[in-house]
Amino acid sequence: MHSVSLYEETIFLWGLTALLSIFTAVFLFLIVYQVLVGPLGEDPAPNWFFLFMSLLFLFMAINFRALSIKMTARSVIVGYGIFKRTIFWDNIERCYVDEVSSIRYGGWGIRIGRVKGKWRLVYNVIGGPRVVLSLKRGRFGEFVFSTRNPDEVMRVVRHMTGRMA
């Protein structure tokens, strides 16, 4: 069943993707150097370590290249690659713009924080506003995500939940 999208947004993280790609290339270079030229230093890391690190950074570069937001008739779906979170409309109590600094969450990406006694699951990017969804049930009391259009996101949430605040 294909669900009609009420709102869609993708925030590409070009700087992060470039940085992670550089780390991938460095570890690939190190394994190739060690295999073809010889050991790196007197106590070299094993080849599997360089291979593992290359694959890890490659996965992170691909998976975390963008934050996607999709709102359908059933739910809000926010995700970084394979790490997606689905919040159904009937579980949303209210929504508002997040006033807390990203530093409070320990930075950017997928984070967990506690604000005013409630646990928050946060999917955020560097800069820009975030929307908070207060939830009726679940492990987290609030779900927070970055968006370039908080007013439009909140308009759709309020329309779908029948709430004005």
Image (cartoon, rainbow, N blue to C red):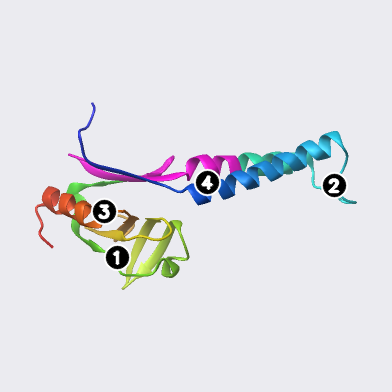
The numbered mark at residue 17 is 4
**Which amino acid lies under the numbered mark 1 shown in the image of this protein?**
Asp
| Mark 3 neighbour density, 10 Å: few (under 14) some (14–19) many (20 or more) | few
Q: Which of the two discs, 1 and 4, labels the residue nearer the N terminus?
A: 4
Q: CA distance from mark 2 to mark 3?
A: 49 Å
On screen, residue 101 above or below 139? below
Query: Mark 2 is on which residue type?
Result: Leu
Name the residue located 52 percent from the left edge and 46 percent from the top edge: 17
- Mark 3: which amino acid? Asn
CB under 8 Å between discs 2 and 3: no
Does residue 62 belong to the magenta stretch? yes
Mark 2 lies on residue: 40
Q: Residue at x 22, y 32 (%)?
A: 3
Q: Which residue ends up furthest to the right in the rendered image?
A: 42
Which residue is the site of mark 1? 98
- The numbered mark, 2 or 1, whose residue comes first in the sequence reads 2
Of mark 4 and mark 2, the one earlier in the sequence is 4
Is 83 covered by the magenta stretch?
yes
Q: CA distance from mark 1 to mark 4?
A: 26 Å
